[in-house]
């Protein structure tokens, strides 16, 4: 539980027939002890080797992962990037390591990322990966980095630090960045490289501004995200998890406060959103008790687990829950069609066992659990409802239908390694297989 590379909760299961038994434990077992997760100091030779490689870089980039926040290393990351003029891109777990308007924040990386971050990562000659597992969504199935780019892995877990023949720096992110910074004193990346990265980010910001605008297409996730982003407090926390919303929040959300974005996509846990939001609200610091926790959830995830709306009302831990209803598992339907298949049984309207599909009354359901609730027709009405929810004293649920076909962000994606049938009677499936396999040519060769 206390190892920094794989720390986490432990489950203790006691059979019922043992729970009533007594045992005379020594009193010393119950003496107060403080257990700490240790900060592992990186090896000095690994630091020296990594610093030497960074000094040779003409186009370095930092990939900032969730480990930066777990280590409490946001200030060290920021200071390191600024001191050496190195652009920063963020993973899904690393969203909100830097504010949106920081000049070295080039955007989110990977399959659910941004054109700006993917372009800069693809052009980089040295990649410093800090506190990231470099999983397939981040690396685009290992296509977002140039085949000849050198990787430096700064990670508390040696198995993650050494991925893809990285120069491994095994250790804590905070201590590692401080040591690397000291070893790089006086060194800066070429200024024109940061200028190029900032131009890419400006182009991406312009795209996002148009993507979240009202009326640019039928109701969309991005429009709802844009409404909330414009009206929330910088210290409000946003939470989302499965389906299409993690990609949409990652791509379109402009970070207003450090550590305020929780996109749980490591396991794509359907049903995490409301329960996770309630937990985040419970854990909220006393000094930020007046700040809101905002949950983005699709209709599919809502139907899987929603009972913590009731919990939030009972405990007085206010949430603002946005239910964006696209009439089924629309992101799976999109993925299905993107592999050359025909739409099948992911949208309620396509359900073969229901003669007249009906919409769930999410508003009535939320009211039944004690929450304020209302249904809105468009982003303008959503903005008004969100302001009412901000002013309310208890949990509010706002429902808006979004388009299952046109309500998606179309830019910012990278190649993703997905299984497609090599043998099929369908020409569309065969064509999609050929397209996916063609992208494999850009994969880095590694271990």
Image (cartoon, rainbow, N blue to C red):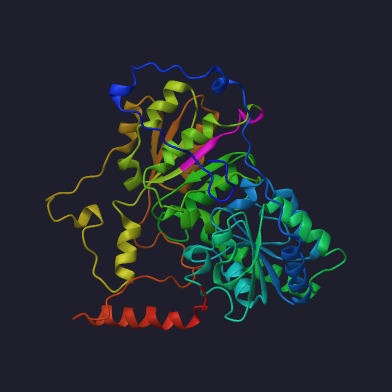
Residue lying at 57% horizontally and 45% vertically, measured from the top left = 3
Q: Is residue 91 magenta?
A: no
Instruction: Give whichever of 398, 19 is nearer the camera.
Output: 19
Give the x, y percent position of residue 209: 58, 59
Q: Is residue 326 left or right of residue 5?
A: left
Which residue is drawn at the image coordinates 59% and 39% (left, top)? 236
Q: Eyeballing the image, is 347 above or below 286?
A: below
Please name whichever residue, 266 or 13, is drawn nearer the observer in this view of the structure. 13
Query: Quick check: 441 left or right of 14?
Result: right
Expressed as whole percent of the image width and height from the top left, the position of residue 176 reads 72, 56
Q: How far across and down, in percent of the image, does residue 167 sit?
A: 65, 69
In terms of image quadrants, where is residue 198?
Answer: bottom right
Q: Is residue 95 visible?
A: no
In this view, the residue farthest toward the right is 186
What residue appears at the point 32 percent right and 79 percent down from the top-left corner?
433
Position of 297 with respect to 425 (left or right) is right
Q: Quadrant of residue 154?
A: bottom right
Q: Residue at x 23, y 69 (%)?
A: 342
Visible residue check, residue 177: yes
Return the x and y of residue 358 as percentages of the image width and height: 21, 45
Nearer to us in this view, 353 or 246 = 246
Q: How many marks?
A: 0
Magenta residues, start to end: 287-295
- Answer with the quarter of the image where residue 104 lies: bottom right
Q: Is residue 9 above or below residue 152?
A: above
């Amino acid at each position: 539980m206390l190892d920094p590379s794989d720390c986490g909760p432990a489950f203790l299961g006691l059979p019922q027939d043992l729970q009533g038994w007594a045992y005379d434990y020594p009193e010393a077992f119950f003496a107060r002890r403080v257990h700490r997760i240790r900060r592992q100091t990186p090896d000095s030779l690994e630091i020296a080797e990594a610093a030497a490689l960074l000094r040779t870089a003409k186009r370095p980039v930092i990939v900032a992962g969730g480990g930066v926040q777990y280590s409490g290393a946001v200030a060290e990351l920021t200071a390191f990037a600024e001191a050496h003029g190195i652009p920063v891109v963020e993973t899904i777990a690393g969203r909100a390591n830097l504010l949106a308007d920081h000049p070295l924040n080039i955007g989110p990386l990977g399959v659910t990322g941004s054109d700006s971050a993917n372009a800069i990562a693809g052009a980089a000659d040295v990649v410093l990966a800090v506190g990231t597992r470099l999983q397939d969504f981040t690396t685009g199935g290992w296509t977002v980095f140039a085949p000849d780019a050198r990787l430096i892995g700064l990670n508390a877990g040696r198995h993650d630090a050494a991925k893809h023949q990285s120069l491994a720096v095994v250790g804590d992110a905070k201590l590692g960045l401080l040591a690397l910074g000291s070893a790089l004193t006086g060194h800066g990346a070429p200024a024109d490289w940061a200028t190029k990265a900032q131009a890419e980010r400006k182009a991406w910001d312009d795209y996002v501004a148009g993507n979240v605008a009202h009326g640019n297409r039928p109701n969309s996730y991005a429009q709802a995200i844009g409404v909330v982003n414009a009206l929330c407090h910088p210290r409000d926390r946003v939470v989302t998890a499965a389906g299409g919303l993690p990609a949409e929040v990652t791509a379109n959300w402009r970070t207003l406060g450090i550590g305020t974005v929780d996109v749980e996509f490591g396991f794509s846990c359907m049903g995490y959103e409301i329960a996770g939001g309630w937990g985040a609200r419970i854990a909220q610091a006393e000094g930020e008790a007046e700040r809101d926790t905002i949950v983005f959830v699709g209709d599919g995830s809502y139907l899987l687990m929603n009972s913590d709306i009731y919990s939030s009302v009972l405990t007085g831990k206010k949430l603002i829950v946005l239910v964006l209803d696209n009439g089924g598992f629309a992101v799976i339907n999109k993925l299905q069609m993107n592999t050359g298949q025909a739409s099948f049984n992911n949208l309620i309207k396509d359900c073969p066992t229901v003669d007249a599909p009906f919409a769930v009354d999410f508003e009535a359901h939320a009211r039944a659990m004690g929450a304020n609730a209302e249904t809105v027709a468009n982003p303008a009405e959503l903005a008004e409802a969100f302001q009412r929810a901000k002013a309310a004293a208890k949990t509010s649920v706002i429902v808006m239908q979004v388009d299952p076909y046109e309500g998606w962000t179309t830019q910012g994606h990278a190649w993703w390694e997905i299984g497609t049938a090599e043998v099929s009677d369908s020409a569309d499936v065969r064509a999609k297989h050929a397209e996916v396999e063609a992208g494999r040519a850009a994969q880095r060769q590694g271990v």
